Image (cartoon, rainbow, N blue to C red):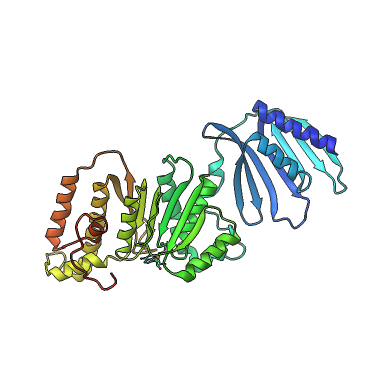
Amino acid sequence: MSENLDIFLNRIADAAEQGTLVKMTLSKPALKHDELRNIYVKPVLIKEKRLFAFTYHYERRDEVKNYDAAQMLSILKELVPDHFLNAVLFTVDEDITLLVSSKGKATLQTKKVQECREQSLEHDKQKTRLINPANPWWYQLGLTTREGKITADMQHKFKQIYKYAEIVESLVKPMKFDGTVHIADMGAGKGYLTFALHELLTQRLNLDVDIKGVEIRPDLVMKINEIIKADNLNGLEFVESSIEAYHPEKLDVLIALHACNTATDDAIASGIKAGADLIVCAPCCHKQIRQEMERSGKVDAITRYGIFLERQAVMITDTIRALILEYFGYKTQVMEFIEMEHTPKNVLLVGRKTSKEPKKAEILQQIADLKRQYGIETHYLETALGLIPWKRNIFSSK
Ligand SMILES: C[S@@+](CC[C@H](N)C(=O)[O-])C[C@H]1O[C@@H](n2cnc3c(N)ncnc32)[C@H](O)[C@@H]1O
């Protein structure tokens, strides 16, 4: 038995070294009730390094880990035959199968392949789904059944999560990170989007992350941290704090989705101060500017209609936020987050740090013009960043 196993492992080592290993599968768990059903291995090229991606197929989730050749061999020694009784090595010109019987007898079968095979080093990202509802946290967060089916009343929420993951992937993929990616999700709430972010970045984009979900409600923080612990999710943690009081030293990406009123401004300010490369926020209610507009008594042909005053306040609030981001050197984009039928809070404000010198005087003039036109004394973000002093405390929650 050990002789055949040694031969098999040597063939793997040779194929890995010669670049002829196409793929490998480990199946037939030795323990009937093992949650880990099988493993699929394929060579990948990551940052110019030839590695081997192990996709661990558990009963209700997949996990991908990358190893170099030496690590791969020592892991395989642990897995076969103790965890898996069948292993197949596919090389460019033959298939080698190791079969271990229930009595521990190992046999080797070799089959020459007729077709022309090549080793593909394409990265395996596309294989993993953007978000996999079968992952246990989606059930624990209340979005799916135990079997990983999205519940009827969470279909809309899941669409939003999926859309969010698509947008974040398109924003993060072109970025270059030096080691761990530090992320704060401010006003993380029940954690749906924070878990989606973690799943996307670790399982699909293979990034090493340190994600902090900042949330003011202690009960939520405790509950979410229990889920994180149960699922052994590295690089994800919820922190009980107000957004205003949370000042991370190192921050690459700042996320703030639907943080109420000026909490979005505090989050943006924190991202700018920490020099985040990417700032993504979906503003929520826009009370501060609307109250200033109402108080000023200035009405024009548009804002004399209540509903338009509301919409105008939203646009002015977010336009000034976008301008302030530009002032601090961010290239700013405003995009639709999700179709209106799912939520009226459907704008995503995205700022990407650039090295281009901003036209500061011009930007400040545009902000001043807007404020003058609508009778606004101060935009809260200006004060949060110390651009102008906070003149008046006009709303009770601050
Ligand atoms: C509307 S929920 C959004 C949750 C999540 N980001 C999402 O989009 O699904 C806003 C969350 O922010 C939290 N929150 C509001 N103001 C906050 C503040 N100043 N500091 C920290 N958390 C805050 C609330 O407790 C709530 O859980």
Residue at image coords 66%, 56%? 59
Coordinates of residue 219 in the picture (x, y in percent): 48, 71
Instruction: Decide which of 363, 374 is in the foreground and name it.
Output: 363
**Which quarter of the image is occupied by the N terminus?**
top right
Coordinates of residue 11 in the picture (x, y in percent): 74, 31
Q: Is residue 31 left or right of residue 46?
A: right
Residue at image coords 36%, 63%? 259
| In this view, 347 is above or below 394 | above
Residue at image coords 17%, 70%? 294
Q: Quarter-wise, where is residue 375 in the image?
A: bottom left
| In this view, 209 is above or below 306 | above
**Which quarter of the image is occupied by the C terminus?**
bottom left
Residue at image coords 62%, 29%? 118
Ligand 1 quadrant? bottom left
Instruction: Decide which of 23, 237 is in the foreground and name it.
Output: 237
| In this view, 294 is above or below 64 | below
Coordinates of residue 82 in the picture (x, y in percent): 78, 47
Q: Quarter-wise, where is residue 8 in the image?
A: top right
Q: Is residue 171 left or right of residue 373?
A: right
